[in-house]
Amino acid sequence: MAGSIHEGPEFGIGDFVLLREVTHEAFLENLRLRYEKNRIYTYIGEVVVSVNPYKTVDIYNQTYVDHYKGRELYERPPHIFALADSAYKTMKRKSRDTCIVISGESGSGKTEASKIIMRYISAVTNVSGRKEVERVKDVLIKSNVILEAFGNAKTNRNDNSSRFGKYMDINFDFKGDPIGGHINNYLLEKSRVVHQQNGERNFHAFYQLLSGAPDQKLEEMKLSRNPDEYHFIRQGGSPKCSTINDQSDYRAVMAALKTLNFAFKHAETLWKIVAAVLHMGNMEFDTVDEVHDTVGVRDGHKLKNLAGLLSVTQEDLKKALTSRVIAAGGNVVNKEFTKSEALYARDAFAKAIYDRMFSWIVSRINEVIDPKESGTGYIGKGTVIGVLDIYGFEIFQNNSFEQLCINYCNEKLQQLFIELVLKQEQEEYMKEGIAWVHVEYFNNKIICELIEQPHKGILAILDEACLNVGKVTDEMFLTAMTQKLKSDRFTCRALSPADKTLEHSRDFRIRHYAGDVSYSVVGFIDKNKDTLFQDFKRLLYNSKDELVKAMWPEGIQDITATTKRPLTAGTNFKNSIIALVDQLATKEPHYVRCVKPNDIKSPSNFDEERVKHQVMYLGLLENVRVRRAGFVYRAKYSRFLDRYKLITKNTWPNFRGNEVDGVKMIIKSQGFEKDVAYGKSKIFIQSPQTLFTLEETRDKYIPFIIVFLQKFWRGGLARRRAKQMRAIYLIMAKFKRYKMRSYILNLVQLFRNVRNMRDYGKSIKWPTPPQVLTGLVEELRKVHSRWRANMILKKVPRPEWPMLQTKCTAQDVLKGQRADWGYRRKWEGNYLASSKDNSSTIDFVTKANALKASDHFSEILFSSYIKKTNKHNQTADRAIVITDKFIYKLDPKKKYKLLRRGISIGDVTGLSITPDADQLSVIHLKDGNDLVICLQNPSREERVGELVGSLSRFFRRNRKELPVTVAKQIKCSLGSKPRQILVKPSPANGGPTFRKEGNSLVLMWPQ
Ligand SMILES: Nc1ncnc2c1ncn2[C@@H]1O[C@H](COP(=O)(O)OP(=O)(O)O)[C@@H](O)[C@H]1O
Ligand SMILES: [Mg+2]
């Protein structure tokens, strides 16, 4: 209902109830607009109006099924799925039988609609995938293929026109799964078997057999592929039709027969009967006795073929075709046919055999889909959905008995529609306690009565005519009608002499609800009597083909047996339709009203006149009016409140209180009090305008609501994110602390015992600290180092600390490049002041003090005897004294006389030594004249290490670094000339000496 207007205004209005004004113009305009935009479905309340698109529209796929499944009608744009779902839901919810009545004229899309509905139901059921249910669904759908092959034909209105009425019940179990079904068929248009109007075809089956059957099969049946060779199927002209593929349809029928478990031999028989009818049409008769005007069969070959196909003897067949047996007064007389009688009998035979076959097919399908037999666990209780797809109202060039039946059927359905739609409406108002205003609409009851009334109606008059003994003609029937019928809906030439469109003594006209139809009475009596001579029945009963025999059980009767006169075709039809209508009336109905947009099967042509006509006779406008006269819209209070509560502050977001009060609040806020009525459980709205305004207001608020919801949602999201972040940080912090803690604890554990370790924990490997602790750990290591140093130094007496420092410096500078550097020894520095080295220390000390006084140095870093050489390669024994200001070379033999001036310590640029045990030392000086010396002492102690340590320590104390080179070959500069010094071994006795070897100097070192 209302929801359908949400499709967007460019598609027109989804529910005609909401039209601003109910006029034909407005109705057609909306229908046309929607049709042009491929919106082929539109609602009138719960009724679906469907316009045949005459093209494939992709609106039936799974996406659409999902879209509509389980939804309410008004929740989605109009669609036949919504109606199917509604029928299904109603059945399930209320446990009630429902039905879907599909009406509309021929070619308006009824059969398609019924198939779409069945496919939808199939798609939404059996979610648990039960195998038997799947089989049932398959069978239900495939049965259409067979029924259409034998019961549909191309007419001028529709290439696939159903030539029989079909009502199908689908049975559901308590779970809502289809477990079977039942088909009722109504009046097959069997006259088509022997005659077709121009442009039309016989039933599809004939053409399917000729184009689809394999050569061998045709051969056996003595058939040719060319349909033009057969009288019964060529009368309408070319059998070709672009929308039909007989060949592939034949295969589809064969496959469907297999799916439906038809026995192979039964399928064979069906095709044989079709073939037999084709042959029958070509049977011709020749007068053999001019006097008695009797006939014989012209072609014995044909007779043989036909007899073969029906499995009867040629003799019997020939007899039945050319004569009949009459029982009169206990005597049995054989009466030979005249030529026209023979032709008449032949046609009657063909029609009957085909009609009987069709009925058998339906009954066979019913056996297959019988819910009791389907194996789905039928337990006797369950519900059905009935789908009615019956021939639509039709007007042909020439309308006969069949058209009268068909149109009568449509009158009955229209009657039902009027009754139910009005009845329902009325019941609803009554139930809800609302006063009902009557709406004028055309009630076609009078036309139904005109046709069906006992004793007085057309069918009764026809039956009466048929009952008369003696020769009764169609013309006499027309006269009887003219005299007896008193209705302005009936006329004929005798009653309207001025009407030239009606032929004298032949035509009559009925003003049907759907339009005027002129019928020709020719054939009415015959068709109504629908007699088939007992000879034929007996013939077929005696067939060797058990299926043919089974189709004709009444053939068993003896010719002399008096039987009750069978009901006429008209009365049969009337009874079945009345029964159908009664049955439909017990079910909750759903309507599909099919409209044909044009007569040329065009997908783009909206023939205003044709559509207007249909809209008129289908009473669609009245339908809209009825819906609107009372109230265009009704809804349960809860639903209404849900939908519109956002309109007022008091009801949004939740109304706490009685639903009715909430609804009243909304209505009051909009000032609509006068336009609504409050029922017991529903609110009723009178004018569409009110509903529009409500919808519009709702639309207006929706963006706010959306923003509101978004705000909350976004806020919620942000809060959640913030909470998560906070949690993350907390976890991170905790984790960091945990890491730190455990690291520190680990350190504490590791270093717990360092005090007692020999190396005070030097060997302990520090674990890699977490990132944050790297700085701290760096400091800790320093602290540990210092502590360790302190622990070591603590054991060393204070005065020895400088020596220790010197040793450390030496080690640091030498970096392990010299194997023996004398660190085990006590380093004394000023050796010449010690009696251990110097026997005349007094001389030295005196000299040193004098130098100290004159040169103002403050301490002696190192002193030693040396052997020295110079740029002239002269060697001499001397003493060296290194102070914090100068380096002095003294002559020990001359009471430590100072030889030349002291060398400023600032001139020292480096020191070179060898990696070996020799005592060679080169003190590099700025002026290019290095000191090349070899330390000597009486105890032959290693003292080069100490020299390195003393000088380096001094430099370091002055924040400079002394470059120290350790190499086997020492480079130096003497007299500004580069020289090389090597060490070579010499015998152990004797002291070290320098000597010149080429350009190099060599220290001969005693081993
Ligand atoms: N929903 C549809 N989609 C596409 N084509 C359709 C649809 N309904 C009907 N038609 C076309 O119209 C033709 C006639 O429809 P049909 O259902 O046989 O009419 P009816 O049963 O009312 O006589 C179909 O053969 C098909 O070509
Ligand atoms: Mg149809």
Image (tube, rainbow, N blue to C red):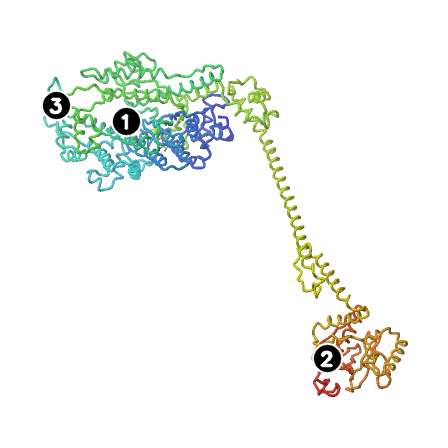
| Rendered position, 224 above or below 412 | below
Determine whether the beta carbon of the residue marked 2 sits less than 8 angstroms from the nearest atom of ligand 1.
no
The foreground one among 1001 and 598 is: 1001
The foreground one among 836 and 896 is: 836
Is residue 46 toward the left or the right of residue 796 in the image? left
Which residue is labeled 3 in the image? 335
Is residue 622 toward the left or the right of residue 912 in the image? left
Nearest to viewer (mark 3 / mark 2)? 2
Residue 769 lies, in percent from the top left, at 66, 57
Q: Earlier in the sequence, mark 3 or mark 1?
A: 1
Which residue is labeled 2 in the image? 971
Q: Earlier in the sequence, mark 1 or mark 2?
A: 1
Alpha carbon distance from label 3 to label 2: 156 Å
SS at mark 1 in the image:
loop
Residue plotted at (20% across, 38% down): 221
The foreground one among 422 and 199 is: 422
Q: Earlier in the sequence, mark 3 or mark 2?
A: 3
Amino acid type assigned to the residue bearing label 3 in the image: Lys
Residue 727 lies, in percent from the top left, at 64, 44
SS at mark 3 in the image:
strand
| Rendered position, 829 above or below 309 | below
Residue 982 lies, in percent from the top left, at 71, 83
Please identify the quarter of the rendering in which residue 550 is found.
top left
Please identify the quarter of the rendering in which residue 588 is found.
top left
Which residue is labeled 1 in the image? 189
